[in-house]
């Protein structure tokens, strides 16, 4: 899948992805009201509104971007109906030729990580039948538990030719509280990055590894350091746009081949219709607003090269 | 809920909980075959087998232990049917008077953690209606993202009188890879513990805080240090039994009042029928074997005091 992702980025000339993080507050009132009219004020209504919102956005951006990143929390909060829409969204995006990165940030002790790996990337066995479950192409993984919590994901990646992005330096304001702490003069994120580089070597695609890293757009200096520490890992870069990262600061995340990073934007695209720049599209033009915002982001990122 | 948990521990004289981590390999063949006969080799069959297994075990242990800890990965791996059984298990355990700790190890940037907090501990709003979703009493949380990833969980705990256990030092063999790294002479887990102590102060029940910590039974020396660093936090102690922790090593996790820790055992109880000591109960006596193993654990832990 890392080869497919790299091909998609080249073909669409867009090292960008859209985060499908549909908070209800982003979803136009009319869509929410329609769903409530059909299902009452229920989790089913919330999930249905999320689905319709996602579908229109995916239809509007699928020819521009190579990948999407649904954030599991935004679905899980609506319980079983929400998770059904997570699954439906993953399936629909794959039908539309998009690479799907499940932003699930799972991570546990070995045997438990193995279950998450099977459910999200691999297959579970029932009787003599092997079944795919959520079947994303990539997922994000939390490294706090160390190697034996990561290895089961790598094993499944190798078998299924799928991938993971391991949290190294996250985009949020307090990420430094633990991640920046110095260990023998080197910050923890760099130590995690060194481990990612080793794991990456053990699970290579063509030019890049199935094991990538998450490094927030909000910390470009650290992005530059981590780029060199993990030469074979794709870097997933959240925090562009709404969280404050700008394109000119993103150059250090890329390799000299112009590859090696994919920049994520969520609400900056999916809720673009609420920004002054796109308000002319109105609530009902939310998908077209998302398309225009994705095109603007593509152009903005182009200026890096 | 921390007050309810402490009361339950006192009343049942058992600072122990049962981990409901039903890997299919633990579930007796006849239960799996029955479910497959009804549903074919499908996710529904796997989920149904998990449900029947859980229900019998819960019925057999609910008068002995104050709490259970379902591990979300073991349900999530079976997709929507699996997650429906997770929800059903949470509901059933609460009906049986058990405190439910969802072992979900979630954690993300602020707005995303808020969604997880709403879905697992709080309520989501659809139109003008507030709805409970998975509605566990406690969940486990990963600290790698720092304060702004933790705060939304604390906010919901305060509102709902529920709780979290934050991963501090995990029970797995490679937990030291990052958690033991020295920062100004102090290991990372201790720094995380210091933060837990602060968060705990901000969210107090009667004698203990709604904010607890996870510290593995496999590292008793660190347990003793962390006990003192986080005096107001309940410590959830996994790794007893199957992972190698023994009762005599658990004393340091408790405060002088005999409280402050709750020891978890999963496969050592739920799959007890596969151990030589309980094989006389046979496959079909798996629930009675679990009951006997829980009683033995209670007695073993009693020796600490």
Image: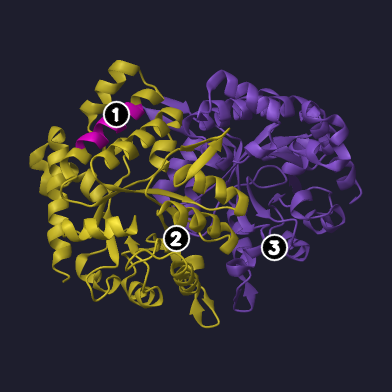
Chain colours: A yellow, B purple
The alpha-carbon separation of the residues under discs 2 and 1 comes to: 31 Å
Label annotation for residue A166: 2
Give the side of residue A125 with respect to residue B32, left or right.
Answer: left
Q: Earlier in the sequence, mark 2 or mark 1?
A: 1
Residue position marked by numbered label 3 in the rendering: B229
Residue position marked by numbered label 1 in the rendering: A49
Number of residues whose C-alpha sits closer than 10 Å to that of mark 2, classed few (under 14), some (14–19) or many (20 or more): many
Give the side of residue B49 with respect to residue B146, left or right.
Answer: right
The alpha-carbon separation of the residues under discs 3 and 2 comes to: 30 Å
Q: Which label lies toward us, 2 or 1?
A: 2
Q: Nearer the viewer, residue B236 or B70?
A: B70
- Residue B37 in sight from this viewpoint: yes
Q: Nearer the viewer, residue A71 or A182?
A: A71
Question: Subunit of mark 3?
Answer: B
Question: Subunit of mark 1?
Answer: A
Q: Which residues are magenta?
A: A46-56
Question: Subunit of mark 2?
Answer: A
Give the side of residue B85 with respect to residue B173, left or right.
Answer: left
Q: State the residue at coordinates (70%, 26%).
A: B30
Q: State the residue at coordinates (56%, 51%).
A: A113
Give the side of residue A194 with respect to residue B24, left or right.
Answer: left
Q: State the residue at coordinates (21%, 26%).
A: A30
Q: Are marks 1 and 3 in contact (CB under 8 Å)?
A: no
Name the residue furthest bottom: A185
The alpha-carbon separation of the residues under discs 1 and 3 comes to: 46 Å
Q: On the same chain: label 1 and label 3?
A: no
């Amino acid at each position: 899948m890392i080869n497919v992702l790299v091909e998609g980025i080249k073909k669409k000339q867009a090292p960008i992805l859209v985060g499908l993080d549909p908070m209800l507050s982003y979803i136009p009132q009319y869509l929410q009201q329609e769903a409530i009219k059909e299902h009452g004020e229920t989790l089913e209504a919330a999930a249905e509104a999320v689905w319709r919102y996602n579908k229109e956005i995916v239809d509007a951006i699928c020819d521009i971007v190579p990948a999407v990143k649904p954030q599991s929390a935004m679905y899980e909060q609506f319980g079983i109906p929400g998770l059904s829409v997570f699954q439906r969204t993953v399936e629909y995006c794959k039908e539309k030729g998009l690479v799907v990165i499940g932003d699930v940030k799972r991570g546990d002790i070995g045997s438990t990580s193995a279950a998450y790996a099977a459910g999200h990337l691999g297959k579970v066995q029932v009787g003599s039948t092997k079944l795919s479950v959520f079947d994303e192409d990539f997922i994000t993984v939390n490294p706090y538990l160390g190697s034996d919590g990561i290895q089961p994901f790598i094993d499944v990646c190798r078998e299924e030719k799928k991938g993971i992005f391991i949290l190294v330096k996250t985009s949020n304001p307090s990420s430094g509280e633990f991640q920046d702490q110095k260990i023998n003069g080197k910050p923890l994120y760099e130590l995690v990055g060194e481990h990612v580089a080793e794991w990456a070597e053990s699970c290579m695609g063509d030019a890049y590894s199935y094991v990538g890293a998450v490094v927030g757009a909000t910390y470009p200096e650290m992005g530059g350091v981590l780029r060199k520490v993990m030469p074979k890992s794709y870097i997933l870069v959240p925090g562009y746009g709404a969280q404050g990262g700008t394109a000119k600061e993103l150059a250090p995340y890329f390799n000299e081949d112009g590859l090696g990073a994919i920049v994520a934007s969520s609400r900056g695209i999916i809720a673009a219709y609420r920004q002054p720049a796109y308000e002319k599209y109105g609530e009902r033009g939310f998908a077209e607003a998302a398309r225009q915002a994705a095109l603007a982001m593509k152009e903005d990122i182009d200026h890096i090269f």
